[in-house]
């Protein structure tokens, strides 16, 4: 569930009419984040470097991603390279191997390499994860993942802290040579899920809350770094669970970069449910 704040939230916030000098410190912080949400959302695309680490009893699993993300259309698209490594990933055939990844508005595709194609892949290199089918198989948590994947706009992280009102300014810090302001908020995980899951029924939200409790996740801390152009340049999310802690960090740069995503050829694509033996 790391990366909860990658999506969801309200519509992009507009600029306020109050003079910042007349605001209280708490109001000023919210006004600053409101402007950052607006500016970041309007950029439509950016280059991204991220790393998500899960600490489990079986060892550490780290997933690194690098590429470009676009949120200008009805959903999120991206061209990335993904690498999984760590003790918990050693048994995976792709461990330590960079995998090309494509994210369209309705599915994610991973190029699993020649070894996969010659064995489980039935001659095909790309593994397709259809968001609708993931949601069907995983229930409420799958529906939340679907929503995240389709709305992975960096501005949503800012909007979430705005909507919660639970945020404080840590101070000025440098991020990769850039002067930034650091903000932090700590939110209940089930609260995060409810704030982002606009399409889930009350029953599904209760089931999702139960799933999160079973995983031992109670709170998630979100740190944001905003530069002088009121753009998000770094995001870090941490959560502690009984089955392992999660830590996710992302850097954003080159806002407005061009992103052109074409899904791989169907003739070289296999659905994940076919690999599991549950598809047709």
Image (spheres, rainbow, N blue to C red):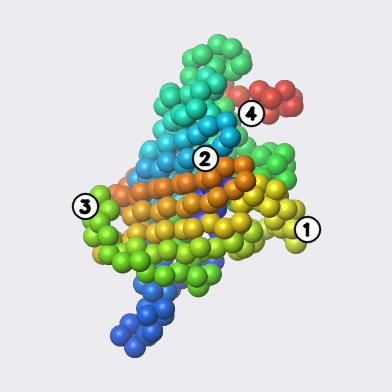
Q: Is residue 28 left or right of residue 172?
A: right
Residue extending farthest bottom: 22
* Residue annotated with mark 2: 54
Q: Nearer the viewer, mark 3 or mark 2?
A: 2
Question: N-terminal of the two: label 1 or label 3?
Answer: 3
Disc 4 crowd, CA 10 A, few/some/many (<14, 14-19, 20+): some
Give the mark nearer the N terminus: 4 vs 3: 3
Mark earlier in primary sequence (3, 2): 2
Asked whether the beta carbons under mark 1 and mark 4 sit within 8 Å of each other, the answer is: no
In the rendered picture of this protein, how many numbered marks are placed on residues? 4
> Residue beneath label 3, please?
177
Q: Are marks 4 and 3 in contact (CB under 8 Å)?
A: no
Nearer the camera: disc 1 or disc 2? 2
The residues tagged by marks 4 and 3 sit, at their Cα atoms, a distance apart of 41 Å
Q: Which residue is pictured at 42% across the width and 36% down the height? A: 64
Q: Is residue 189 left or right of residue 174?
A: right
169, 272: nearer the viewer: 169
Residue 167 is situated, as x and y percent measured from the top left of the image, at: 45, 69
Q: Nearer the viewer, residue 274 or 96?
A: 96
Q: CA distance from mark 3 to mark 2?
A: 28 Å
Name the residue rendered at 70%, 41% in the picture. Answer: 138
Quick one: label 4 or label 2, which is nearer the N terminus?
2
Q: Which residue is mark 1?
A: 203
Image location of residue 253, percent across then percent down: 31, 50
């Amino acid at each position: 569930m790391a990366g909860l704040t990658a999506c969801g939230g309200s519509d992009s916030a507009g600029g306020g009419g109050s003079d910042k000098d007349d605001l209280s410190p708490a109001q000023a912080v919210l006004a600053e984040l409101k402007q950052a949400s607006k500016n970041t959302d309007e950029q439509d695309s950016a280059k991204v470097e991220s790393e998500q680490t899960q600490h489990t009893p079986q060892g550490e699993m780290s997933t690194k991603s690098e590429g470009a993300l676009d949120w200008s259309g009805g959903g999120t698209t991206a061209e990335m390279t993904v690498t999984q490594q760590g003790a918990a990933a050693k048994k995976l055939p792709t461990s330590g191997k960079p995998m090309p990844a494509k994210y369209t508005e309705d599915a994610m595709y991973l190029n699993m390499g020649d070894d996969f194609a010659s064995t489980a892949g039935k001659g095909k290199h790309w593994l397709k994860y259809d968001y609708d089918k993931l949601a069907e198989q995983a229930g409420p948590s799958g529906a939340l993942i679907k929503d995240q994947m389709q709305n992975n706009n960096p501005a949503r992280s800012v909007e979430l802290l705005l909507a919660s009102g639970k945020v404080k300014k840590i101070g000025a810090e440098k991020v990769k040579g850039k002067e930034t302001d650091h903000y932090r908020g700590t939110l209940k995980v089930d609260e995060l899920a409810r704030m982002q899951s606009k399409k889930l029924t009350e029953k599904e939200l209760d089931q999702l809350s139960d799933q999160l409790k079973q995983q031992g996740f109670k709170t998630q801390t979100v740190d944001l770094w905003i530069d002088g152009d009121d753009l998000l340049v770094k995001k870090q999310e941490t959560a502690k669970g009984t089955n392992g802690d999660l830590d996710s960090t992302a850097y954003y740069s080159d806002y407005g970069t061009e992103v052109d995503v074409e899904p791989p050829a169907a003739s070289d694509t296999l659905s994940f449910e076919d690999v599991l033996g549950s598809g047709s």
